[in-house]
Image (cartoon, rainbow, N blue to C red):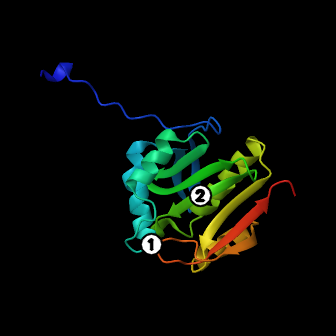
Amino acid sequence: MFLKFKKKKKEKPVAQTLIDFPTERFEAAGEVLTLRLATVSDIPGMVAIQEAVYNGYAPWVSRDFYHELTSEEDRLYLVAVKRDQVVAFIALVRREQVPDLHIANIAVLPIWQFRSVGSYLINTAKAVAWEIGLPLLSLEARRSNTGALALYDRLGFYVQDVIEHYYLDNKEDAISMVQNLEA
């Protein structure tokens, strides 16, 4: 087949219904990063971030991200990018039964941690929740993830519950945290 007639492989669009999120730039420790919607082509970077954060283990594998990015309607996945490299991401889920905006996953490359990237992502999640009229922001974190728990506490979250044996990989407890955005 002639190259000029070869069909271009089109990237599957991201399921996007929470809000029309515009690409934005932000500063973290003197560096300018871009925050934008995640795409399928970002999946390897998101998996690599988890592997870096969890010592070679990725709690969410490529197919998990692919499913979330392409077929769910109540999600919002954002990536923070520096020079075309994904350095952090956040996965937001609108839950009707609670109702809240749930941070289903958030991770920052270790070399970008403690540079306000995670704080920026969480503050963006707060703004999204407010924009779509949800009164609560929620998340779970591993009991052993003391750095993340301290960050969430500093950003106004409080412990709602401890969920025993929550994580499938090692049966570690989860600390369930919420923040009331109406207060």
Q: Residue at x 51, y 50 (%)?
A: 79
**158 shown above or below 80:** below
Q: Where's the C terminus, which quadrant? A: bottom right
Q: Quadrant of residue 74?
A: top right
From this viewpoint, is residue 82 visible? no
Residue 141 percent coordinates (x, y): 61, 70
Disc 2 residue crowd, few under 14, some 14–19, many 20+, Cα 10 Å: some
* Image position of 179 with respect to 151: above or below: above
Q: Find numbered disc 1 in the image and state the secondary structure of the residue it sits on.
A: loop
Amino acid at dot 1: Tyr
Dot 1 or dot 2, earlier in sequence: 1
Q: In this view, does 59 lie above or below 102?
A: below
Q: How far apart are marks 1 and 2 (CA)?
A: 16 Å
Residue 54 marker: 1
In this view, the residue in front, 3 or 178, is 178
The tag on residue 13 is none
Left or right of residue 68, residue 40 in this image:
left
Residue 62 percent across, percent down from the top left: 39, 54
Q: Are marks 1 and 2 in contact (CB under 8 Å)?
A: no
Which quarter shows the N terminus? top left
What type is the residue that disc 2 sits on? Answer: Ala
Q: Where is residue 129 in the image (x, y as percent from the top left)?
A: 72, 48
Residue 21 in the image: above or below residue 27: above
Q: In which quarter of the image is residue 121?
A: bottom right
Label 2's element?
strand
State the residue at coordinates (81%, 55%).
181
Q: Which residue is drawn at 38% across and 34% down?
A: 11
Decide which of 22, 75 is in the foreground and name it.
75
Residue found at the far left of this picture: 1
Give the residue number, with chain letter if any, for mark 2: 104
**Residue 98 visible in the picture:** yes
Q: Nearer the viewer, residue 18 or 89?
A: 18
